[in-house]
Image (spheres, coloured by chain):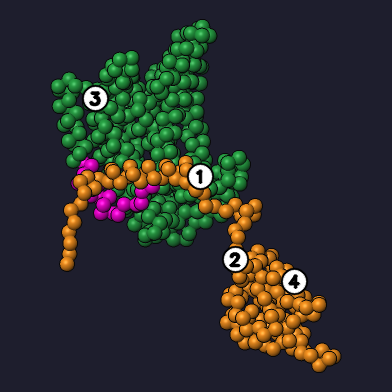
Chain colours: A orange, B green
């Protein structure tokens, strides 16, 4: 049913609404709580579960990765490229481990899929570079943002 | 003014006033850009630009450099001559209006009377009305010459809006003209120094807002509409027509449109304070302070007058500044009107009220109440 409500007196000329609105904004102007984070000096506290820059976890200087190919399989953005090799002790290891971070969507599925706790996502979110590089194994093995 | 009878000093004064006014008006633009950005930020619980210079004051300078060094791209489909002319036509009328606004009382120096007003025209208010209606040409020309549908829609809205609100503006001014029986702004300002009611030691001056409260509201609303500021910024309407009439403009040509907007804001504020708040009449307390200083230092007549002019310019600037801030304040408070609401408000409410206001003013004057 269409209900027609009677408009309050003088609502058509907006005067009361404008005055109350302006009182609100001037209050905000003088006493409002500022929500701006002054970025380089102040930083927002992110959760420890924040999914940022990848790294490959190493134990005693050797990467945990066994090149099982689970992460490139599960990766929806297809940004992980691994070439497997064999160590002298017959253990499988990645010769190449490259992540194209420009394609990565930071879903964290590689981290979930990894049985060896090797590929991990740190909380680092400042990833801007001047070149469009694909990060190789040496870069990823630096334990930055280790957790 | 008899040009042949003017000597060297007259010429210097004659030429210095427009230059001074233009320079001051140009300074309004960067300051207002900064006020707008910081003010809007604080109203919205943000901080705004605060990195360049103290409190971000040099942000406008950086903006100006950016504006001037950007590529000045002219699209292939525009009508060259009118496209180039439109931004200029937006800025020039805004400057021209300020010519008749007095910003201080007369100063007598060596038997020479200096009017602090670029042109003391005897048509005053009529000149203002005619020049402000020129501003719409720049916008229409920009929209038409851009050869773009959004731009054309913006300028169409603008022309309809400005013509509708010009009527109200003119009719609201009729009330003021009737009350002070003059169209010259200097006379109107002088008229506002008279006493309306004497409340013991406090004399309430005959300010425009006291004798024409309805006219004041109508005029202020019309000025908001004439300057294309929110809540009446239909010609720009970002969400509907991208950017409206200045869509195809880049670099300093766009900057000129922005300058035109801020300068017409400044002119509008100066007009509101001149017509309804006593113009350069000193703020309450300033007259007393001036008297005290003159007495204490035993200043001679000329220096006392110079001090008075200083106080008057300060008062005028303060009043204009307050109204400039109100433009910003209103912009960040009220959302844009829908087009039919705009037209309803203009034609069905403000125009009849303005006419009634004229009749009421006439009745009051006939009865001798004001």
Q: CA distance from mark 2 to mark 4?
A: 19 Å
Chain letter, disc 3 residue: B
Write the residue at 31% across / 20% down.
B204
The residue that appears at 50% across and 28% down in the rendered structure is B20
Query: What subunit carries mark 2?
Result: A
User: Residue A113 appears in which quarter of the rendering?
Assistant: bottom right
Which chain does the residue under circle 1 lie in? B
Which numbered mark, 1 or 2, is in the foreground of this view?
2
Picture residue at 17% right of the left edge, 25% below the top = B364
Q: How far is mark 2 from mark 3, CA to CA?
A: 68 Å
The mark closer to the camera, 4 or 1, is 4
Which residue lies under the disc numbered 3? B179
Please provide percent x and percent y for residue B94.
41, 38
Graded by Cα atoms within 10 Å as few (under 14), some (14 to 19) or many (20 or more), the crowding at tag 4 reads: some
- In this rendering, the answer to whether B32 lies above or below B116 is below
Query: Which residue position is annotated with label 2?
Result: A47
Q: Nearer the viewer, mark 2 or mark 4?
A: 2
Q: Residues within 10 Å of mark 1 (few under 14, many from 20)?
A: many
- Confirm or deny contact between disc 1 and disc 3 (CB under 8 A): no
Write down the residue under mark 1.
B38
Residue A62: x, y in percent?
A: 80, 80
Give the spatial CA distance, label 1 vs label 3.
Answer: 39 Å
> Quick one: quadrant of the C terminus of chain A?
bottom right
Asked if the residue at tag 4 contacts the one at tag 2, i.e. Cβ–Cβ closer than 8 Å, the answer is no
């Amino acid at each position: 049913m269409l209900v027609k409500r009677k408009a309050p007196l003088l609502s058509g000329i907006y005067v009361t609404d404008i005055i109350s609105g302006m009182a609100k904004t001037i209050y905000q102007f003088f006493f409002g709580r500022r929500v701006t984070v002054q970025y380089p000096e102040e930083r927002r506290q992110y959760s420890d579960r924040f999914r940022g820059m990848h790294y490959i976890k190493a134990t005693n200087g050797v990467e945990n990765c066994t090149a099982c190919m689970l992460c490139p399989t599960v990766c929806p953005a297809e940004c992980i490229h691994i070439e497997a090799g064999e160590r002298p002790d017959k253990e499988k290891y990645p010769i190449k481990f490259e992540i194209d971070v420009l394609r990565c969507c930071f879903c964290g599925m590689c981290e979930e899929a990894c049985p060896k706790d090797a590929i991990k996502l740190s909380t680092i979110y400042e990833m801007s570079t001047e070149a469009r590089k694909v990060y190789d194994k040496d870069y990823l093995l630096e334990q930055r943002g280790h957790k | 003014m008899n040009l042949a009878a003017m000597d060297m000093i007259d010429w210097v004064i004659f030429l210095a006033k427009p230059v001074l006014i233009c320079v001051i008006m140009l300074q309004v633009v960067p300051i207002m850009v900064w006020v707008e950005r910081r003010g809007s930020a604080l109203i919205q619980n943000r901080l705004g630009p605060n990195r360049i210079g103290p409190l971000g004051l040099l942000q406008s300078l950086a903006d100006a450099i950016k504006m001037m060094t950007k590529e000045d791209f002219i699209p292939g489909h525009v009508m060259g001559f009118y496209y180039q002319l439109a931004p200029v036509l937006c800025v020039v009328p805004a400057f021209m209006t300020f010519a008749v606004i007095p910003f201080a009382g007369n100063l007598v120096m060596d038997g020479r009377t200096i009017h602090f007003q670029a042109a003391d025209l005897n048509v005053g208010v009529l000149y203002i009305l005619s020049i402000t209606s020129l501003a719409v040409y720049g916008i229409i020309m920009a929209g038409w010459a851009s050869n773009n549908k959004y731009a054309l829609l913006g300028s169409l809205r603008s022309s309809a809006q400005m013509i509708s609100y010009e009527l109200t503006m003119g009719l609201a001014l009729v009330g003021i003209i009737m009350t002070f029986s003059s169209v010259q702004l200097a006379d109107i300002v002088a008229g506002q120094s008279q006493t309306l009611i004497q409340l013991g030691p406090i004399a309430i001056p005959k300010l425009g807002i006291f004798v024409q409260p309805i006219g004041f509201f109508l005029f202020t609303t019309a000025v908001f509409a004439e300057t294309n500021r929110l809540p009446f910024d239909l010609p720009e309407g970002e969400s509907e027509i991208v950017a409206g009439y200045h869509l195809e403009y880049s670099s300093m040509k766009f900057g000129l449109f922005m300058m035109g907007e801020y300068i017409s804001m400044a002119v509008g504020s100066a007009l509101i304070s001149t017509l309804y708040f006593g113009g350069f009449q000193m703020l309450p307390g300033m007259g007393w302070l001036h008297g005290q200083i003159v007495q204490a230092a035993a200043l001679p007549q000329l220096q006392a007058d110079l001090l008075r002019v200083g106080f008057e310019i300060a008062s005028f600037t303060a009043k204009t500044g307050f109204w400039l801030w109100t433009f910003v304040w209103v912009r960040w408070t009220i959302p844009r009107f829908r087009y039919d609401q705009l037209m309803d408000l203009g034609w069905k409410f403000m125009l009849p009220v303005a006419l009634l206001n004229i009749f009421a003013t006439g009745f009051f004057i006939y009865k001798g109440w004001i």
